[in-house]
Structures are given as structure tokens and as C-alpha cells.
Amino acid sequence: MRKKIVVGNWKMNKTYNEGIEFVDEIIKESLSHSTDDVLKIIATPYIHLAAIANKLEHLNGFEVAAQNCHHNPKGAYTGEISAAMIESTGAKYVIIGHSERRLYSGENNNLLAQKVNIALANNLTPIFCIGENLIERNANMHLEAIKIQLKEALFHLPSKDFIKLILAYEPVWAIGTGVTATIHQAQGMHNYIRSEINKKYGKEISTAISILYGGSCNTKNAKELFDCIDVDGGLIGGSSLIGSEYLAIVNSIKK
Ligand code: 13P
């Protein structure tokens, strides 16, 4: 059985105290819900990582993630954070390849491949994002776009490392727009991603890897998306910023 996972990506939101309050609230609320079979990961700004990792340490099924890491191990890169630094906070996950970093920070597949390597070398699990933009979707090039991202950023990995990844399909046109992929579009793409993985790494790995959906996923549409056979959970932006909404999305995963 593939792991069900719901990642909340705060992006550049929440001051230090707001982040701590959020976690205190979900700790309290989750004690009255049983969601142990869903892995819940909160991807916070760097400032929260150590404190939240500490708070979540003894809480079953909760983890904290960084939203990025540098591709070099250390050195004169002012303002950057290394994978080893993230690991030292107690975080075990890192988002890599988010479309906002591809767009605003010019991160390409080649650089992202290096980030994946260094994250794995530091025992961090990459939550790797792939997704086509609107031009690619409208030109019916969405499958090709995803194929290239997989090939250039991830398919250099040996099987023993590829199996450690969590993938997230985030169509760029659905992120923060209120336009969600239909269940047909989401299931179709997740199935395609799995078939590409099958071609490269074989059936055992392609059926074992969790693929999350992200892009305007909320309390209203989460259930129908998560019910798709190849959708193993979500990567949630805006709707993960309020504790009760985030937990409602977690609870909409079929047990
Ligand atoms: P929204 O849920 O706000 O559309 O963001 C999705 C996302 O980018 C999560 O990483």
C-alpha cells in the first residue's frame, strides 16, 4: 500500500509566533482525530524548522519540511541554506522544484537534479514538484513537458534513491488560481507519471511511489481528487494556512 501524504506548504507566510500557534492548534485538534494512517508534513519557512521539528517529535504521523535547499554543501553563498543545515534542525523532508522557484529564482532541471542529490546525501526526502504551464497544456504538450522534467531532474537516480522520493504533480495553471485540475486531468497525469516511472524503473517502484496533487486543492475538492486511484494525497498551499482547514483536507483521504 502506498503511503497517503498531505503536505501543507506555507510558502512565505506566517511570522515565527504565527507558525508556532498554528502547530499548537493542530496538535490539540489532531489528538481528537485519528489520522495516523496519513503522513502529515508541514513545509514551513526556515525560521520555524527547529522549533516545529521539536514540537512534532513525539506526535505520530507529523513531520516538518523545508521549502528549498541550496545545491552546494556549504560555502560563500550569502542568504542560502544547505541540506545539512536543514537536516540539523530535525526536519526530514525538503520541497524541491516548486514552480515558484523555477519561475522566480530561475531554477532549471539541471540545478534541481543537483539539489535532489544533495538532499538525499544528507538524509532528506525530496518532495519533488513537476507540472506543466498553461501554454504547454493548451498546446497539448503537457505530457511531453512532464516527461522532460522527470528525465532531466530525476531519472539520473539509481533505483535505490528514486524510491525514496515523494512526487507532487502541480499544474502551474492551477497554483493559487482557484482553478483546480479536473479529476480526469489529475488522474490522467498521475497515471502517465507512473507509466513513465514504470518504463524507467519497473513496476515495483512505479506502484510504490507516492504521487501527490497540488494546485487550488481545498476542503471542497480534496476528497474527489484523493479518491483517484493514482493520487496519493496533496500538496496544499493557501488552504493549509488555517489549521482546521488543513486537518479537514487530511481527513478527506479515504481510509
Ligand atoms: P495553492 O494550493 O495555493 O494553489 O498552492 C499549491 C502549491 O503551490 C503548493 O505547493
Image (cartoon, grey):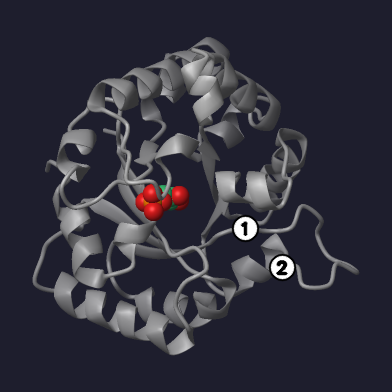
Q: Nearer the viewer, residue 202 or 151?
A: 151
Question: Considering the numbered disc 1 on the image, is that residue within a helix, a strand or a loop?
Answer: loop
Mark closer to the chain start, 1 or 2: 1
Disc 1 from disc 2: Cα separation = 8 Å
**Where in the figure is residue 112, as x and y percent of width and height?**
70, 42
In the rendered image, the residue lying farthest to the bottom is 17
**Where in the figure is residue 213, as x and y percent of width and height?**
36, 38
Q: Amino acid at mark 1?
A: Asn
Please give left or right for residue 8 compared with residue 60 in the image. right
The residue drawn where x is 56% and y is 59% is 67
Q: Which residue is mark 2?
A: 81
Question: Considering the numbered disc 2 on the image, is that residue within a helix, a strand or a loop?
Answer: loop
Q: Amino acid at mark 2?
A: Ile
Q: Note whether residue 236 is visible.
A: no
Instruction: Classify 49 as above or below 40.
Output: below
Please give left or right for residue 186 compared with residue 83 in the image. left
Badge number at residue 50:
none
**Where in the figure is residue 27, as x and y percent of width and height?**
24, 77
The residue drawn where x is 54% and y is 18% is 201
Q: Which residue is mark 1?
A: 68
Instruction: Classify 169 as above or below 188.
Output: below
Q: Are marks 1 and 2 in contact (CB under 8 Å)?
A: yes
Instruction: Classify 45 as above or below 106.
Output: below
Quadrant of the drawing holding the N terminus: top left
